[in-house]
Amino acid sequence: MILAIFLLTFAVLFLFGMPIAFAMIAASWVYALLADIDIAFLSIQMFAGLDSFVLLAIPLFILASEVMNRSSVAQRIFDFTNAIVGRVPGGLGHVNVMANIIFSGMSGSAVADVGGIGRICYNAMVKHGYDAPFSAAVTASAAVIGPIIPPSIPMVVFAMVSGESVAKLFFGGAVPGLMIGLFLMAYIYIVARRRNYPLCPRQGFAAIVAAFAQGFLPLMTPAILLGGIWLGIVTITEAAALAVFYTLLLGVFAYRMIGPRQLIECMKSVVAFCGPILVLLPAAKVFGFVLTSENIPALFSGSVLAITQNPILVLLAINVLFLFLGCVSDPTVNIMLFVPIVMPLAKAIGMDPTHFGVMVVLNCMVGLITPPVGTLLFCLCGFERMPLETLIRAIWPFIWVLLGVLLVVTMFPPIVLTLPNLLFS
C-alpha cells in the first residue's frame, strides 16, 4: 500500500505539470513519512547523489564545447572534412557526418553538436542546393554520434548510476559511433545519387594539406583527451579540465576569438545546461533509494525472467523499453530513473555492464530524434523555422538506419567490448 501511494503521488504530480525532479522528491518524502523513515536520513541520501568527483566532468565538457562553438574551431573542422569528402556524391552530407564524428571527440553532447558544427553544416547544405528537410535530418542524425564517441556526458551519468568504469564506457562507444557514421554516409550517398544533389568542386592535395594545417590544433583535442585517459595520466574529470584549458588556449591566444564577454556567455550556457541535471541527480538518488528499499529491481527482473529466460528476447525487450522511454522523456531522466531497475535483469542474463551501458546510451540518443519529445528536432526547427511535421517525415529513414546499428550492437557484444578489453585488460 505504501509503495502504491508513493507511485501514485509521483504519477499525479508529474501529470499535473510538476517538474519530474520535484515530483520524484515529493513522492519520496511521502514514502518516508508513511514508512516512518527519518527525513534527515532521506535528505542525506538525496544530496549524496551530488557527492561525486566524476560529476565535475559534465560542466567541464560543456564549457569546452561552448568555447569551441564561439571560436573558429567548428569552421576549421568543417573546412577540413569538406576538403576530404566534399567531392563525393552527397559530399556535404558526408562532411556533416564526418565533422560531427570529429567534433564529438571534444564535446560529448548532441545538443552542443547541433548548435555548433551542425548549424554550419546545415547552412552549407541548404546553400548548395540540398533540400532543407533532408539537410536538417542529416544534421540531427549525425549529432546523435556525439554522445556515443568519447567523451560522452550520458555515459558519465550512466557510470554514476551504475558504478561502471567511465573509461571502459567511453572506449566501448568508439566503434559503434563510427558504425553509425558509416551507415549514415552510405544512406546519404544513395539518396544523393537518386536526387542528383550537386557536387562540390574538387580540391587538390595542396588545399587538403592547407585545411589540415588550419584544423590541426582542434584535431589534436580528442587525441590528447583519450590518450591521457588510456595512458592513465588523467582521470575522466581531469581530462575534462584539460579539455577546457586546451580549448581556452586555442580560443583566447591562438585564434583570439574568446574574450571576457564571450567567456561569460559560455558560463551562462553551462549553468543553463547543467542546472536540470544537478537537480535531477539528487532526485534520482532518493527515488532510487525508495525503489531499492521496496526491492523493485529484483521484482522486475524476476517478473521478466518468469516470462522468458531467452537472452535475445530479454535484450529486445530492454531495447523496446528504452526506445519507448526515449519517445516521451529526456535521456538523462531515463538513464537515472530506469537503469537501476533494468540493470539487474541485464546482469541476470550475463550481459557485460559496458555493453549494457553503450546499448542504453545508444537507445537514449535515438530518442533525441524520435517524436513527440525529440530534443534535436525541436532545436533544428527552432533556429531554422521549419515545421516539425516536415522534419519528422524526413527523419524516419535515418531513424531506421540508427535502429539497424542498434540491433547489430545489441546482438554482437564484441563490437563494444573488444576495444576496452584490449586497452584495459
Image (tube, rainbow, N blue to C red):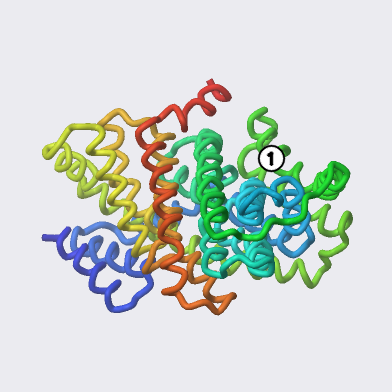
- In the displayed structure, 405 sits above or below 67; it is above
- In the displayed structure, 355 sits above or below 268; it is above
- Residue 285: image quadrant is bottom left
User: Where is mark 1, residue-wise?
Assistant: 225
Q: Is residue 397 left or right of residue 314?
A: right
| Badge 1 density bin: few <14, some 14–19, many ≥20, Cα 10 Å | many
The N terminus lies in quadrant: bottom left
| Residue found 33% across the figure and 78% down from its top | 17
Foreground residue among 404 and 112: 404
| Residue found 67% across the figure and 36% down from its top | 234
| Residue 270: % across, % down | 62, 64
| Residue found 76% across the figure and 42% down from its top | 220
What amino acid is labelled 1 in the image?
Leu
Foreground residue among 376 and 84: 84
| Residue 208: % across, % down | 82, 45
| Residue 66: % across, % down | 68, 61
| Residue found 26% across the figure and 67% down from its top | 10
- In the displayed structure, 7 sits above or below 230; it is below
* Camera sees residue 61: no
Foreground residue among 85 and 303: 85
Regarding mark 1 in the picture, which secondary structure is present there?
A: helix
Q: Is residue 351 left or right of residue 307?
A: right
Q: Is residue 261 left or right of residue 154?
A: right
